[in-house]
Image (cartoon, helix red, strand yellow):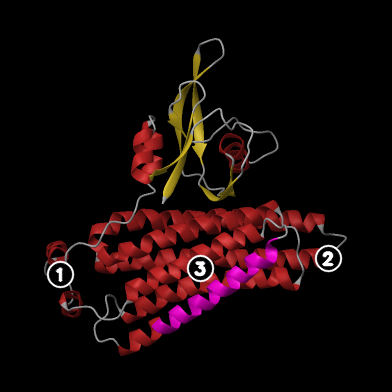
């Protein structure tokens, strides 16, 4: 994972692309435009803010005022060869740790540091000691035995492989809903990733049946991978609907829901390696799943606003409402499935950490 920073024009310190609100644009859309003007970056801006920070902004007369910045994650899809402020700033990609160290503002450091690489799994003996200390004698005998026995199967690898299909599918979905000449290619990417996900869940179900000792209860494994598979299935259904109805343009609310899905897929991919050590990673898992739930709530708001706007605009074209509502329905179901993933992970933390 890499974070892009730029230098400010006045102090030459490292900052993120930012600017004043733009009339007529939502905050995340304005952030998207500023990222292009200042760094040539194009991508999908998530409408759900990561947080905010403040800093003293210098005026032309030398005085300063406190400016408050809302920060939005933007999944980068490319960088232009030319952009308005090229040559006025340095542009550099940093590791997460180096980016957090490079900026001055404490709250911005915290926001950037939240994008952190999953920790490596501890040695087997250390994990068992921590587990036994935290659980003491209050655990059921079967779960105690399950924790101590060597694990079989490759469930963790399968979870991570499936999460990778979610990330690729979500990226393609967001780009599909931008319209333009590449729509067929983005649809095909979603179809291909959905087929890969089907192969993975088939392997998981076979391993559940033939593996003696599993890392979690069998039902927990199948429920988690099933929720993830439902998410990519709904992405697939969305792509098929755009093909069947020959959709060429999409409402801003649809694009914003797709951006939320990109962020939800990224978060899901981050949670999967953490499942290898539930005790050590329980706080981080709860933090990430809470954001997944918030993203789903934000998607519900966009869905409602989008359907209302669609109904008003399509009164003379009822089929436009039917088609639009179909796409909104699939997008909402994608976000619902990510909330299911969050609930399953929270259940694992409660049961095993």
Labels 3 and 2: the sequence-earlier one: 2
Dot 3 falls on a residue whose secondary structure is helix
Q: Is residue 59 above or below residue 33?
A: above
According to the image, label 1 marks what residue? 138
Q: Is residue 36 above or below residue 186?
A: above
Left or right: 114, with 317 as reference point: left
Mark 2 and mark 1: Cα distance apart in space: 61 Å
Q: Does the magenta-highlighted stretch encompass residue 191?
A: yes
User: Residue 201's spot in the image, x, y percent?
Assistant: 44, 80
Residue designated by label 2:
318
- Describe the element under mark 2 as helix, strand or loop: helix
Q: Residue at x 34, y 84 (%)?
A: 208
Mark 1 Cα-neighbour bin, 10 Å: few <14, some 14–19, many ≥20: few
Q: Point out which mark residue 14 bears.
A: none
The secondary structure that most of the magenta stretch takes on is helix
Q: Nearer the viewer, mark 3 or mark 1?
A: 3
Q: Residue 245 vs residue 236: left or right?
A: right
| Sequence-earlier tag: 2 or 1 | 1
**269 vs 313, nearest the viewer:** 269
Q: Position of residue 52 (x, y in %)?
A: 46, 36
Q: Secondary structure at mark 1?
A: loop
Is residue 346 visible to the viewer in this orientation of the structure?
no
Among the two numbered marks 3 and 1 on one chain, the one whose residue lies closer to the N terminus:
1
Mark pair 3, 2: CA separation: 29 Å
The magenta region covers 182-203
Q: Which residue is mark 3?
A: 337
- The residue at 68%/61% (across/down) is 182
The answer to whether any part of residue 77 appears in the image is yes
Residue beneath the point at 76% across and 61% down = 248
Classify the position of the C terminus by image quarter.
bottom left
């Amino acid at each position: 994972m890499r974070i892009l920073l730029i230098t400010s024009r006045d102090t030459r310190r490292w900052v993120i692309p930012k600017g004043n609100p733009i009339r007529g644009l939502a905050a995340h859309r304005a952030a998207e435009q500023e990222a292009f003007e200042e760094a040539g970056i194009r991508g999908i801006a998530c409408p759900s803010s990561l947080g905010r920070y403040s800093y003293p902004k210098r005026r032309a007369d030398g005085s300063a005022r406190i400016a408050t910045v809302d920060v939005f994650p933007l999944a980068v899809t490319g960088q232009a060869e030319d952009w308005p402020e090229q040559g006025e700033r340095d542009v550099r990609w940093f590791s997460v740790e180096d980016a957090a160290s490079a900026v001055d503002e404490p709250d911005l450091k915290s926001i950037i540091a939240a994008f952190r690489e999953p920790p490596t799994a501890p040695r087997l003996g250390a994990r068992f000691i921590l587990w036994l200390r935290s659980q003491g004698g209050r655990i059921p005998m079967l779960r105690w035995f399950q924790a101590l026995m060597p694990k079989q199967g490759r469930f963790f690898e399968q979870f991570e492989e499936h999460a990778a299909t979610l990330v690729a599918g979500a990226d393609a979905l967001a780009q599909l809903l931008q319209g333009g000449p590449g729509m067929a290619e983005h649809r095909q990417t979603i179809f291909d990733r959905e087929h890969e996900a089907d192969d993975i869940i088939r392997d998981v179900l076979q391993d559940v049946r033939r593996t003696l000792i599993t890392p979690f209860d069998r039902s927990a494994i199948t429920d988690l991978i099933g929720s993830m598979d439902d998410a990519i299935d709904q992405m697939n259904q969305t792509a098929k609907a755009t093909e069947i109805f020959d959709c060429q343009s999409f409402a801003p609310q649809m694009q914003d829901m797709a951006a939320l899905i990109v962020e939800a897929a990224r978060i899901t991919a981050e949670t999967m390696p953490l499942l290898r050590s539930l005790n050590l990673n329980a706080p981080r898992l709860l933090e990430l799943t809470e954001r997944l739930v918030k993203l789903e709530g934000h998607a519900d708001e966009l869905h409602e606003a989008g359907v209302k706007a669609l109904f008003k605009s399509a009164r003379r074209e009822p089929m436009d409402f039917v088609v639009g509502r179909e796409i909104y329905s699939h997008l909402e179901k994608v976000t619902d499935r990510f909330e299911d993933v969050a609930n399953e992970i929270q259940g694992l933390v409660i049961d095993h950490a």
